[in-house]
């Protein structure tokens, strides 16, 4: 028995000496000290030992077990220290390297231009107002002098939720709400998202933004409209900017006009940007139709006013010389970082 214990001890110690990783050391522990290990199997033969020798043999087995456990613990500590040393050597952190930079966002081109437009008109004494994007048919059309048989009522142009509710096609509906609930003088700017049933291409989208202005007061004339838009254009596109009015038709206004600004790239001489004309179309405007004033409870004999509307994407494309509106909504950071 003594010879067997010594043999087991020597073999176990030799195996521990050869072990170079913790997994192998665990295998040695199981092989010699586990439930089916050699030392455990040897203990099962104690019943064949005489009663006089049994205490001595038991003591020898315990001493062997204790010696192997101590050797295992010592070897485990060595291997753990070695593994940690190798980890430190292979996973070096160079504290002198610069830290990883954080990426900070900035305003979208549309937001930048909108804030600039709002700043210009707030400086003129306008109030920024908002309204619902889901609108009653009355405020989106009828209150703006657009009767039932008008082409704009066609479902091909408008998203109808039901016969009486639509996704607003213009922020002019906000003006109808304001005129109905406030008494003149009124001077407001209503920017917001609008919806139309358009195919997506370089200049169209089913969802885009408009900025519309409204002024109602006594003795307001077309000259006031022209002066306001000239000042706005100079602030937005530069002090040398000129404007011209072309007759047009809008149900909401009478008379109505389209407004062009002189090309800020060539100064009106004609270039690729303005397609050789020297002018860039920018917005629509006109004097508020007397019937619109009447429907809102405002006396057209006492008050007059003007209104104008500009597409936010339109002036963003012009200001930053972008040739495809889809670029504004693709969320490509390579494009957006340029602004």
Image (cartoon, rainbow, N blue to C red):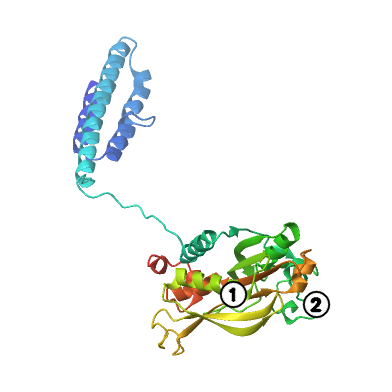
The numbered mark at residue 223 is: 1
Q: Nearer the viewer, residue 302 or 123?
A: 302
Residue at the image position 40 percent from the left and 82 percent from the top: 267
Q: Residue at x 72, y 65 (%)?
A: 176
Quadrant including the N terminus? top left
User: In terms of secondary structure, where does tag 1 sit?
Assistant: helix
Horizontal side of 26 relative to 156 (left or right) equals left
Question: What is the C-alpha distance between the residues marked 2 and 1?
Answer: 33 Å
Residue 304, image quadrant: bottom right
The residue at 25%/35% (across/down) is 80
Whether residue 62 is situated above or below residue 179 in the rendered picture: above
Give x and y (percent) for residue 283.
57, 76
Q: Pointer 1: residues within 10 angstroms few (<14), some, or many (20+)?
A: few
Is 141 on the left or on the right of 5, as rendered? Answer: right
Residue behind mark 2 = 148
User: Can residue 137 be seen in the rendering of this structure?
Assistant: no
Disc 2, SS = loop
Badge count = 2
Name the quadrant of the C terminus: bottom left
Q: Say which label, 2 or 1, has the lower sequence index.
A: 2
Residue 28 versus residue 227 in the image, above or below: above
Q: Position of residue 238 (x, y in %)?
A: 42, 72
Left or right side of 202 for 293: right
Q: Position of residue 26 (x, y in %)?
A: 31, 35
Please report contact status of discs 2 and 1: CB closer than 8 Å, yes or no. Answer: no
| Foreground pick, 193 / 18 | 193
Side of 301 where 226 appears, left or right = left
Q: Which mark is residue 20?
A: none
């Amino acid at each position: 028995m003594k010879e067997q214990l010594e043999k087991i001890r020597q073999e176990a110690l030799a195996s521990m000496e050869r072990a170079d990783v913790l997994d192998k050391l665990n295998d040695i522990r199981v092989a010699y000290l586990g439930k089916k290990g050699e030392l455990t199997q040897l203990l099962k033969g104690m019943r064949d030992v005489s009663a006089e020798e049994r205490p001595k043999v038991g003591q020898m087995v315990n001493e062997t077990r204790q010696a192997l456990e101590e050797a295992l613990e010592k070897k485990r500590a060595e291997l753990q220290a070695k593994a940690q040393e190798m980890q430190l050597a292979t996973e070096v952190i160079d504290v002198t390297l610069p830290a990883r930079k954080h990426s900070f966002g900035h305003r979208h081109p549309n937001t930048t231009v909108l804030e600039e437009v709002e700043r210009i008109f707030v400086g003129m004494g306008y109030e920024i107002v908002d309204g619902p994007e889901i609108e009653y048919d009355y405020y989106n059309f009828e209150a703006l002098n657009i009767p039932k048989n008008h082409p704009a009522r066609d479902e091909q142009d408008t998203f109808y939720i039901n016969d009486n509710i639509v996704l607003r096609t213009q922020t002019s509906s906000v003006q109808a709400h304001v005129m109905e609930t406030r008494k003149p003088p009124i001077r407001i700017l209503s920017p917001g998202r609008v919806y139309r049933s358009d195919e997506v291409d370089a200049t169209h989208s089913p969802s885009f933004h408009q900025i519309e202005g409204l002024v109602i007061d006594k003795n307001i004339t077309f000259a006031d409209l022209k002066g306001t838009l000239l000042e706005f254009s100079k602030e937005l596109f530069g002090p040398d900017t000129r404007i011209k009015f072309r007759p047009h038709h809008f149900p909401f206004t009478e008379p109505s006009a389209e407004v062009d600004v002189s090309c800020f790239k060539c100064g009106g001489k004609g270039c690729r940007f303005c397609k050789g004309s020297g002018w860039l179309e920018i917005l629509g405007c006109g004097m508020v139709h007397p019937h619109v004033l009447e429907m809102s409870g405002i006396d057209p004999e006492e008050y007059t006013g003007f209104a104008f509307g500009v597409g936010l994407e339109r002036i963003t494309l012009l200001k930053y010389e972008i040739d495809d509106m889809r670029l504004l909504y693709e969320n490509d950071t390579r494009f957006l970082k340029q602004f």
